[in-house]
Image (cartoon, grey):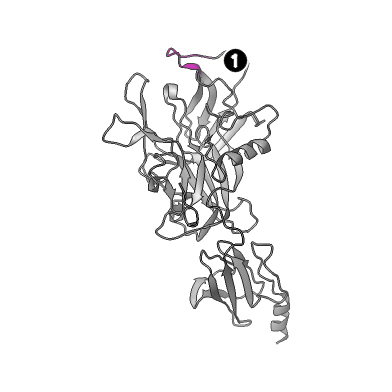
Amino acid sequence: MKKIILYLLLASLLSGCKEDIPMVNLGIDDLYHIPRMQKLALHPAFTGRQYEWLIDGEIVSTERDYIFISASEGIFDVELKIIDSETPYDFSFQIVVMHEEVEYSPYISKVYEYCPAPGQFVNDMPRFEEGDSYESMLQKVEESISGTNDIMISLGGYGGYVTFGFDHTVINVPGEYDFRIWGNSFYELTDKNRKGGSAEAGIVEVSYDTNCNGIPDDQWYELAGSAYYDTQTRHHYSIEYHKPNDDRLPVPDDSGFLSDIEYIPWRDSDGTTGFISKNIFHDQSYWPKWVDSDELTFKGTRLPPNAFDTSGLGRYFILYCFDWGYVDNHPNDYVDLNSFKIDWAVDDKGKPVYLPAIDFVRVYTGLNQYCGWLGETSTELCRAADLHIQDIVIR
């Protein structure tokens, strides 16, 4: 009996993701109030051989820790069973899920990271100004793509990325698209048999804030788009870019469109080398000027090349669309083709992973290819939205 009392005195309170969730001293409280689409992290210190968390009589987890979240309002009857021959424990309590005090926005509310690879729109989308730091550039990106703003940002060549989140957790609704991302892709009209034009596909990764610290430092999962299992897709790919030497003489090509075909050298994990060339249409530095490092390394999945020179002369390139599951891959008018399901998440071995919700989204350029005077393939985006916030019409 003394042993059980000691365990109860040492049991920790649930630690919630919301600072205003009350704490108690002797275990789980009888009642909690939380807004919808916000997490309540449950971490009892009372240990045992097995654990069962039940909601309305159904087992929802057998782990010691459990994060409760609900998209709908209501009263939920929760039961924790700790199965142990010496210290069995069974406790029932309620969680009241309320409507948020301030209505959620469906759109991006915060940008956490902006790390573009070198490219012809870097330092221009958004514009770098002398004195800008990483923090000020991050602020410019947030101002460009948050809320209803729709100012395009560029991620540069392969691997360049941006990480953002919303003012709430995005719920995984099985069978439905969960969020949407806008790019600037368009179709060309000469090929009637295949969808193509400017499809600069960006790969999407998602993360669930399981440690509830509000920063994107948890496990990331790729959303497996239509080309994920393609035999030409390269997983665990990496590339290293080297800062250009400003003192070297540029090497133009014969077309007149490229002012330096050996501008920024790169080497990838396959041992292949190449360059991001500089063209006559963009004469600013293609290297992010707020970055002090002489090297930039990016890792991820590389999609199969999708660009074809249909002229045979380097004059007319078509970037064909992947079927689904990528950013900046189809025109924005095609809602489903620019929307994403959390259920597509896979781990680094390609095994499907169930995530009840996500807090962070990362988009990175998924192609490593150069298209003559068009330059490197670089993903652009301007906005994103949670498709489950029905109160606001998303255009």
Instruction: State whether residue 318 appears in this view.
Output: yes
The residue under label 1 is 248
The answer to whether residue 11 is magenta is no
Is residue 102 rendered to the left or right of residue 61? right
The answer to whether residue 256 is magenta is yes
Snapshot quadrant of residue 15:
bottom right
Locate residue 224, reporting x and y percent.
Answer: 42, 49
Snapshot quadrant of residue 332:
top left
Which residue type does callout 1 highlight? Arg
Is residue 288 rendered to the left or right of residue 378? right
**Considering the image in quadrants, where does the N terminus appear?**
bottom right
Snapshot quadrant of residue 160:
top right
Closer to the camera in the image, 29 or 44: 29
Residue at the bottom extreme of this rendering: 1
What residue sits 71% from the left and 77% below the top? 26
Locate residue 335, reporting x and y percent.
Answer: 40, 47
**Image mark count:** 1
What residue sits 63% from the left and 29% below the top? 128
**Above/below status of 219 relative to 61:** above
Closer to the camera in the image, 382 or 211: 382
**Above/below status of 392 relative to 317:** below
Locate residue 81, reporting x and y percent.
Answer: 57, 78
Locate residue 346, reporting x and y percent.
Answer: 46, 53
Which contiguous range is marked in magenta?
251-260
Is residue 135 rendered to the left or right of residue 389? right
What residue sits 46% from the left and 14% below the top? 253
Instruction: State whether residue 224 appears in this view.
Output: no
SS assignment at label 1: loop
